[in-house]
Image (cartoon, rainbow, N blue to C red):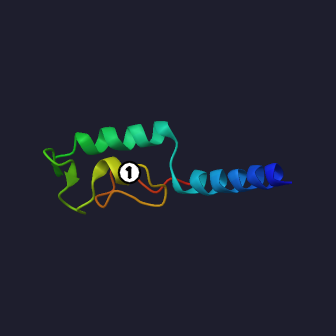
Amino acid sequence: MLEKLKAKLTEKANNVVNRIVVPDEVREERLKICMSCDRLVPKINMCNTCGCIVHAKTWVANTACPIKKWDIHPH
């Protein structure tokens, strides 16, 4: 019974993560765009427009570039 519960909880957790985090190829494309943007503060990898740390923000599905270089990722 505990194994079934553990498997079900793992499945539910993975479903949540998959809705929050973008696939690797989407993240890589977003990061590529951010790293070549003139608004990036390269020393700290921070966006000078929205203040995000691009290595973190590019993983999040429900977020977009404030100057429209990339958009929210649909589920």
Kind of residue sitting beneath label 1 = Trp
Task: Single out the residue that lies furthest toward the front.
Answer: 2
Spot occupied by residue 36 in the image (x, y as percentages of width and height): 22, 39
Instruction: Please say whether residue 75 is visible from this viewpoint.
Output: no
Task: Single out the residue that lies furthest toward the right.
Answer: 1
**Quarter of the figure that contains the N terminus:** bottom right
Up-down: is 72 above or below 35? Answer: below
Instruction: Please say whether residue 17 is visible from this viewpoint.
Output: yes
Along the viewing direction, whichever of 5 and 50 lies nearer the viewer: 5
Q: Is residue 75 left or right of residue 50?
A: right
Q: Is residue 23 left or right of residue 59?
A: right
Label 1, secondary structure: give it.
loop
Q: Is residue 20 left or right of residue 71?
A: right
**Residue, disc 1:** 70
Q: How many marks?
A: 1
Give residue 52's quadrant in the image: bottom left
At a point 21% along the width and 45% down the height, the residue shown is 37
Up-down: is 23 above or below 61? Answer: above
Q: Is residue 53 left or right of residue 19?
A: left
Spot occupied by residue 28 in the image (x, y as percentages of width and height): 40, 37
**Quarter of the figure that contains the C terminus:** bottom right
At a point 30% along the width and 61% down the height, the residue shown is 66
Spot occupied by residue 54 in the image (x, y as percentages of width and height): 29, 50
Along the viewing direction, whichever of 25 and 56 lies nearer the viewer: 56
Spot occupied by residue 74 in the image (x, y as percentages of width and height): 56, 54
Q: Residues within 10 Å of mark 1 (few under 14, many from 20)?
A: some
